[in-house]
Amino acid sequence: MSRQWMIRAAAMLLLVTVTPAAPPAAAVAGARAAALPYQDPSLPVATRVSDLMGRMSPDDKLGQMTQAERGSVSAGDITAHRLGAVLSGGGSAPSPNTPASWADMYDRFQNAALATPLGIPLLYGVDAVHGHNNVVGATIFPHNLGLGATRDPALVQRIGRAVAEEVSGTGVDWNFAPCLCVARDDRWGRTYESFGETPELPSAMATIVTGLQGATLNGPASVLATAKHYLGDGGTAGGVDQGDTRLSEQDLRAIHLPPFKAAVERGVGSVMISYSSWNGAKLHGHQYLISTLLKGELGFTGFVVSDWNGIDQIDGAPGASAHDVRTAINAGVDLVMAPTGWRQFIDLLRAEVQAGRVTQARVDDAVRRILTKKFELGLFERPLTDRAYTATVGSAEHRALARQAVARSQVVLKNAAGVLPLARTGNKIFVAGRSADDIGMQSGGWTISWQGSPGNITPGTTILQGIRNTAGAGTTVTYSRSGSGIDSSYRVAIAVVGETPYAEGQGDRPGGLGLDAADLDTIATLRASGVPVVVVLVSGRPLDVAAHLPGWHALVAAWLPGTEGQGVADVLFGAVQPTGKLPVTWMSGAAQQPINAGDGKTPLFPYGFGLTYDPPQDDTTPP
Ligand code: GLC
């Protein structure tokens, strides 16, 4: 396990805290009269920023450039060190993990920031990458790969708005999303965080930025979005997470830059730097790509944030160093995510500024960018949770939207003899598979915990429950996880199988992309009965199924649908016609990786492939 992961694991262990009730909001926020220009919302933001900066001490500025993890910082630390940002790492939640508890935690940290002499509110960031996925009870939407299969940017924008409402209802004002990576190698553990393998598809889905940020950043429920991970994270050699993207500048620009250009054009407020390298040079220290290209050529005026301890990797030695700090800041990183080592970061940066190796002008540019977003978000006027949105967390309206998105994301890849759609009435259906009745399996990574996990981890509808809900008069539905008990009396068998949840590098699969042995055994049991088998694949990427496909009557790519498994059943029964199209090329075998549209290789199913039920289509599965 890498150092980063060990630190993160240790930080997670410290993260259970009891959150005392926040002092009355009016008692704090109202205590500051709008006596000074920066406190006057009628003035232009630029004017307020300049006035505030003129009042800030050097340490006030360094604190604004620092982000600590909630488990490694106290309210007193925030006040004493003038910290400008806090985050929850994946799965880092207050106890109890409820929307109200999150809001109380946020307000407690925010009031600590407001208690500083200048009362500069903090930013609080989370990875709400498919819903407010750290929060038990939140609506969990399909991961981005499934949303890419919908080919519906307007739907994705609506999802962004719903996520923004749930996130802001817990106080949180900054979302480390969307990932606008272009996934080029399915062995990469973060393939499911991508909207697709072409630059066009993630670019089109940048609409989620508008959903998250709203028409204006200070609008109701707006949260700051983050385009990540800049640049080329999905193009590394071998699909190695945090690896090296070996491309000409022309190809890097053509393949990986367009989604970030689209996000900048939509006014994305922050950009997160990738751990990966470009031709051996770490992105976190890449002045040309960050300052010249992103801030200069693309005209990005928001702020650049590092990834979790991302600057530590610049010099290749463990931990943060003076070299790491000055290289990252001078490259154009404005805000450093230093989850546990935030004190050391501040001390190192102070020393670099005092030595003149980081100019005050660079510090001022970074702070100006950060403060501009805080003013634009309206945090100086409304720093505390808008509890009017707290009830939207997991709301019926949001779950209905997620169900619609799940249905639209389903891709029917094979449908021999029209075995789909399933008859609702008078049917006898056998359901099997370890992913059939498991919210954790169908949600994947970044769900309640960083890596996600099997089990009943949060409220929702499993795929099996969806099937049972849809079955009509005279239809029986039998479930057996292993498939045992099936016999020839059943009219159809549905095997819901796939991948065990994972996140980031822990999902890298350099050794093959085959189905799990347990899943193959389950399918074999079903096939032995002679009953037609429908395979529903719950996975974060295409899997290597070509050798098995001839024995399956149907195959549906369900991706990682999240809490609303009813959407899968909607398509299986034809309540919703399948319209999903592959967002990535489906390999004929893992040896083809990387395989992408236009590369001349012959896939099992090409990018954009997807069957519909009506009009009935002959089985077009290639031999
Ligand atoms: C991670 C991820 C990044 C995430 C950050 C904070 O390591 O690379 O996507 O936003 O940490 O959780």
Image (tube, grey):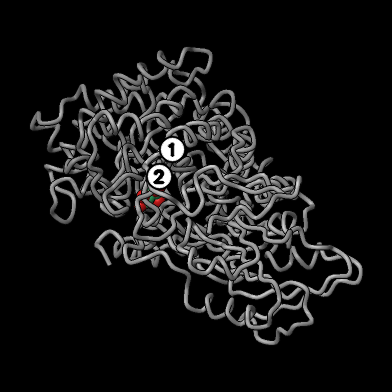
- Is 448 rendered above or below residue 435? above
Q: Quadrant of residue 558?
A: bottom right
Write down the residue under mark 1.
Answer: 198
- Marks 1 & 2, CB-CB < 8 Å contact: yes
Write down the residue under mark 2.
Answer: 596
What amino acid type is highlighted by mark number 1? Thr
Q: Separation of disc 1 and disc 2 at Cα?
A: 8 Å
- Is 302 rendered above or below residue 422? above
Is 246 in front, or is 178?
246
Q: Tell me if 23 is positioned left or right of 2 in this view.
A: right
Is 128 in front, or is 411?
411
Write the residue at 56% across / 26% down. 218
- Residue 205 percent location from the top left of the image: 53, 35
> Secondary structure under badge 1?
loop
- Is 594 rendered above or below residue 352? below
Some atom of ligand 1 lies within 8 Å of the CB belonging to the residue at label 1 = no
Crowdedness of circle 2 by 10 Å Cα count: few (<14), some, many (20+)?
many
Which dot, 1 or 2, sits closer to the camera? Answer: 2
What amino acid type is highlighted by mark number 2? Asn
